Image (cartoon, rainbow, N blue to C red):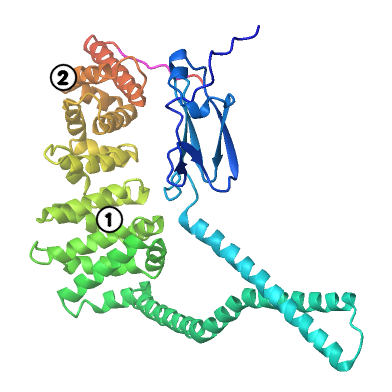
Amino acid sequence: MESAKPAGPPAVRPGLRASSDGLARRSGSLLTPEPRAPVVLRAGSASPADGAAAPAAHAAADEAITFANQGPAKLVVKPDGNILWEMADVNAPVPGGRRGWVVAAQAGAEAALTLSAAFGGLMGASVAVMELARAMHNDYCLTGHALTRTIAVTVSSSTAGMVAGIAYAPVLAARLLLGKVARPAAAAAAAAAAARGAVRLFQLRAAGPAALLRRLACAGGAGAGAVLDALAKVAGAAARSERFRRAFVKLGGIDEILRLLPGLGADGGPGAALLQAALRALGELLREPEAQDALVAAGGVPQLTHLLAHPAAPVAASALALLSGLAGNAVAQESIRECGGVPLFVRTLRDCERPLAQAQAMAVVGALCGGSKEAQEEVVAAGGLQALAGLLREPAPRTQLKESAVSALHALCRASPLRAAALMALPDAEARLSSALSAYGPCWYPCKADLHCLLNLISKAQIAAAAEADGAVMVERPESA
């Protein structure tokens, strides 16, 4: 089906315009000099009203309207069918276009190519003139082939030499710069590095294990300030380097520090600061297992145990922290028991105002309860059952301190039924254990096993006590192998 053509000549819509200063307006028509890229625009179907308003200059025009475009332009299609043709501003920045330095580089490259072509042409012309003059002077026939070959060889060799010079010139300049500047700078940097290395080596030798050990050994007669400074340096170096700790212990540093302990602040006076510094150094060194063995072998456990009763609270706290770190050592446990330190730890368990000290004392007491029979007897004789049962009164339902106390009570009562009976005789002991068990709920925890065992032991003790009251004799069946 063919569509009917509109009546009258096609009209140019008012929206069809060109906004450009480069277009010359002459006699109502749009003209552009030297058309380069014609753009054809087609107008939409015009209404009769628009056809009546069209100029008479376009009465004989075709349906296609052609605009000669010399510069950049854009087309805008309106929703009503009008097509707008607008010249773009050449100086306006193009969104997403190339940067200015890229354009400048392209322009420079084009100029370089143009100059090189011009230079090649001038060189070829000069070579041709020179060859012609030489042929006329020597009176020989110069053919076109020979002239072309001479020009080609001369121009290509000159161009290649020029390009090679341009490419090799920065290399030569960099080589010259390196020879004049970089070599002295590298020599100066090497000399500075060597000087720093020498200074560092001197510092390491001055702050090394052997040097600090000699300084510590000589500081006793130099005064309290020298001793404090030496101990501070030992503590700082031990805190920074594992290698230093091992070397210092291997050289006998633990023995040297223990040798200083008896004369440092025994009366709680100003020397307490020196004693605190010595304990801090020992604490940093005891991070190595070899240091713990060396301290136990050197007899340091009795000295630390005696410091638990020191009048200066920081000194006693530091000694307690060191001993809690040695709780897993069997030799250290025996040393604590032999020097009479068990009552001191049990007494610390009752000090509810110092929870950290309680936890540290609990570590030692728990290790003693799981140790030898002699150590367990020492704990019970010092009132350890009452102190451990008192820890079950904590308001918090589940704490590490309460779990450690339950584990220690289980270790004591499992070794002797008499201790289970003594625990049963304590007021509200069974109720406290039942309350601690119910605090864990239905979930399983390792501490619940100790609580169940304790309650079973107390039940057995109650049954044995009832049977003894009736005159019966309880005989426990041995477990089958």
The residue under the point 71% across, 78% down is 123
Can you identify the residue that label 1 sits on? 301
- The percent position of residue 193, horizontal first and vertical second, equals 43, 79
> Can residue 415 be found in the magenta stretch?
no
- The percent position of residue 291, horizontal first and vertical second, equals 37, 59
**On screen, residue 37 above or below 179:** above
**Residue at the outermost right position:** 141
Asked if residue 162 can be seen in this view, the reply is yes
Residue 159 horizontal side relative to residue 315, left or right: right
Dot 2 surroundings within 10 Å: few (below 14), some, or many (20 or more)?
few
**Residue at the outermost left position:** 269
Cα–Cα span, label 1 and label 2? 37 Å
The residue under the point 59% across, 25% down is 62
For the magenta stretch, what is the residue range? Answer: 473-479
- The percent position of residue 409, horizontal first and vertical second, equals 27, 29
SS state under label 2: loop
Q: Nearer the viewer, residue 171 or 25?
A: 25
Q: Amino acid at mark 2?
A: Asp
Q: Which mark is residue 428?
A: 2
